[in-house]
Each structure stands twice: as structure tokens, then as C-alpha cells.
Amino acid sequence: MTEVEIRQLIRNELKIAPATMDVSEAATYTGICVDTLYTMAREKQIPHIRLRGRVFFRKESIDNWFSQLEKESVQMQLA
């Protein structure tokens, strides 16, 4: 079991929702592969935070981003 899997297991057991996620956690949360998340962050296609060379994602920002993508998708289908 990886460190990320252990942290997620502990969070699930304690019902703790993290405010930020690293790339591995965000990949698990979104279903988007790690390499794609790095590319999307580099190309500023997804909300993220860079701190000392690491990339982090706020859960709330990712949820809002997905909601916005969903709205845009529905609008395109109706047009």
C-alpha cells in the first residue's frame, strides 16, 4: 500500500476532508491521470497552486471547475 493510499484510508476512516491535495491525491479524486494533471497545470487548464516546485489542488476549486465544465457542456449540447 502506498503512502497516498494509507493517507486516504485514514481520512476515510476519520471522515476528514483535506483542503488541498497533491497530484496523486487529485488524480485519485478526479480520475485524471497524474501526467495529465501536470500537463493541465502547466498549461493553466486546471486550477492549482505551485509551492516550492510542487503542485497542489484545492478540493473546492476542483469541484467548482468540474461544475463549470459541466455547465459549459450542457450549454454546448443545447446550442
Image (spheres, helix red, strand yellow):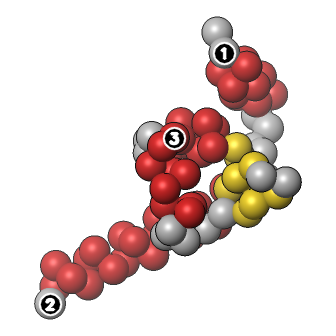
Cα–Cα span, label 3 and label 2: 33 Å
Going by the numbered disc 2, the residue's amino acid type is Ala
Q: Nearer the viewer, residue 15 or 47?
A: 47
The residue wearing badge 1 is: 2
For the residues bearing labels 3 and 2, Cβ distance under 8 angstroms: no
Mark drawn on residue 43 = none
The residue wearing badge 2 is: 79
Q: Closer to the observer: label 1 or label 2?
A: 1
Q: Quadrant of residue 18?
A: top right
Give whichever of discs 1 and 3 has the lower sequence position: 1
Q: Closer to the observer: label 3 or label 2?
A: 3
SS for tag 3?
A: helix
Q: Quadrant of residue 59?
A: bottom right
- Quadrant placement of the C terminus: bottom left
The residue wearing badge 3 is: 34
Q: Position of residue 44 (x, y in %)?
A: 55, 71
* Residue 13 visible in the displayed image: no
- Quadrant placement of the N terminus: top right
